[in-house]
Amino acid sequence: MNLNPRKLLSSKWTAVQPRNKEKHFLITEVEFDENGNLIHCLIEAILSKRSEPIDWTQLKNQEVWLQGWKS
Protein backbone atom coordinates (compact mmCIF):
# COMPACT_ATOMS: atom_id res chain seq x y z
CA MET A 1 0.00 0.00 0.00
CA ASN A 2 1.32 3.43 -0.94
CA LEU A 3 0.62 5.87 1.89
CA ASN A 4 1.54 9.56 1.91
CA PRO A 5 2.42 10.69 5.47
CA ARG A 6 1.41 14.27 4.59
CA LYS A 7 -2.20 13.09 4.13
CA LEU A 8 -2.48 11.11 7.38
CA LEU A 9 -4.00 13.82 9.59
CA SER A 10 -7.74 13.15 10.09
CA SER A 11 -7.57 9.93 8.08
CA LYS A 12 -9.85 7.09 9.16
CA TRP A 13 -8.75 3.52 9.88
CA THR A 14 -10.33 0.19 10.81
CA ALA A 15 -8.54 -2.40 12.91
CA VAL A 16 -8.76 -5.87 11.32
CA GLN A 17 -8.61 -7.46 14.81
CA PRO A 18 -10.44 -5.09 17.21
CA ARG A 19 -9.17 -4.85 20.77
CA ASN A 20 -11.40 -3.79 23.68
CA LYS A 21 -14.28 -3.39 21.19
CA GLU A 22 -12.29 -0.63 19.48
CA LYS A 23 -12.49 -1.00 15.73
CA HIS A 24 -12.62 2.49 14.21
CA PHE A 25 -9.79 4.99 14.60
CA LEU A 26 -8.79 8.47 13.51
CA ILE A 27 -5.32 10.00 13.14
CA THR A 28 -5.46 13.08 15.38
CA GLU A 29 -1.84 14.31 15.44
CA VAL A 30 1.12 14.19 13.10
CA GLU A 31 4.45 15.93 13.55
CA PHE A 32 7.29 16.33 11.07
CA ASP A 33 10.95 17.17 11.61
CA GLU A 34 12.78 19.96 9.79
CA ASN A 35 13.53 17.56 6.90
CA GLY A 36 9.85 16.68 6.41
CA ASN A 37 10.10 13.21 7.97
CA LEU A 38 7.16 12.07 10.06
CA ILE A 39 8.35 11.75 13.66
CA HIS A 40 5.09 11.50 15.62
CA CYS A 41 1.67 10.05 14.81
CA LEU A 42 -1.24 9.71 17.26
CA ILE A 43 -4.22 7.43 16.64
CA GLU A 44 -7.50 7.78 18.57
CA ALA A 45 -10.22 5.18 19.06
CA ILE A 46 -13.60 6.64 18.09
CA LEU A 47 -15.59 4.68 20.68
CA SER A 48 -13.48 5.30 23.79
CA LYS A 49 -11.48 8.41 22.73
CA ARG A 50 -8.34 6.57 23.90
CA SER A 51 -5.22 7.80 22.09
CA GLU A 52 -1.86 6.20 21.59
CA PRO A 53 1.20 6.83 19.45
CA ILE A 54 1.58 4.59 16.42
CA ASP A 55 4.38 3.92 13.98
CA TRP A 56 2.66 5.20 10.84
CA THR A 57 4.33 2.51 8.70
CA GLN A 58 2.18 -0.09 10.52
CA LEU A 59 -0.83 1.40 8.73
CA LYS A 60 0.53 -0.04 5.47
CA ASN A 61 -0.01 -3.59 6.78
CA GLN A 62 -3.45 -4.58 5.44
CA GLU A 63 -3.52 -7.61 7.72
CA VAL A 64 -3.69 -5.19 10.67
CA TRP A 65 -5.24 -1.96 9.33
CA LEU A 66 -7.75 -1.06 6.60
CA GLN A 67 -8.01 2.49 5.33
CA GLY A 68 -11.42 4.06 5.97
CA TRP A 69 -14.15 2.88 8.30
CA LYS A 70 -15.28 -0.60 7.33
CA SER A 71 -18.03 -2.65 8.99
Image (cartoon, helix red, strand yellow):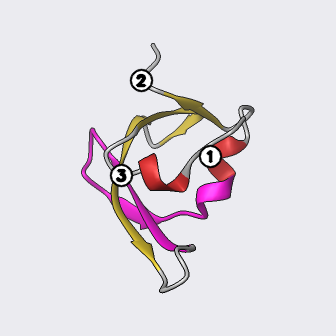
Front one among 51 and 57:
57
In three-dimensional space, the C-alpha distance between marks 3 and 1, rounded to whole angstroms, equals: 13 Å
Front one among 66 and 45:
66
Q: Quadrant of the C terminus?
A: top left
How far from the left and from the top, in percent, is residue 23?
45, 33
Disc 2 marks which amino acid? Trp
The answer to whether 45 appears left or right of 55 in the picture is: left
Q: Quadrant of the rendered structure where residue 12 is?
A: top left
Q: Secondary structure at mark 1?
A: helix
Q: What count of labels does the image hold? A: 3
Q: Which mark is residue 69?
A: 2
Q: Which mark is residue 9?
A: 3
The answer to whether 44 appears left or right of 55 in the picture is: left
As for residue 52 lying within the magenta part, the answer is yes
In three-dimensional space, the C-alpha distance between marks 2 and 1, rounded to whole angstroms, equals: 13 Å
Q: Which mark is residue 59?
A: 1
Task: Point out the residue furthest to the top here.
Answer: 71
Q: Quadrant of the rendered structure where residue 15 is?
A: top right
In three-dimensional space, the C-alpha distance between marks 2 and 3, rounded to whole angstroms, equals: 15 Å
Question: Disc 2 or 3, which lies upstream in sequence?
Answer: 3
As for residue 11 lying within the magenta part, the answer is no
The answer to whether 63 appears left or right of 30 in the picture is: right
Q: Secondary structure at mark 2?
A: loop
Which residue is painted at 44% across and 49% down in the image?
Answer: 8
As drawn, 61 above or below 50? above
How far from the left and from the top, in percent, is residue 44?
34, 52
Q: Quadrant of the N terminus?
A: top right
Which residue is painted at 43% across and 47% down in the image?
Answer: 7
Disc 3 marks which amino acid? Leu
| Circle 3 or circle 1, nearest the eye | 3
Q: Quadrant of the rendered structure where residue 61 is?
A: top right
Q: Residues within 10 Å of mark 1 (few under 14, many from 20)?
A: some
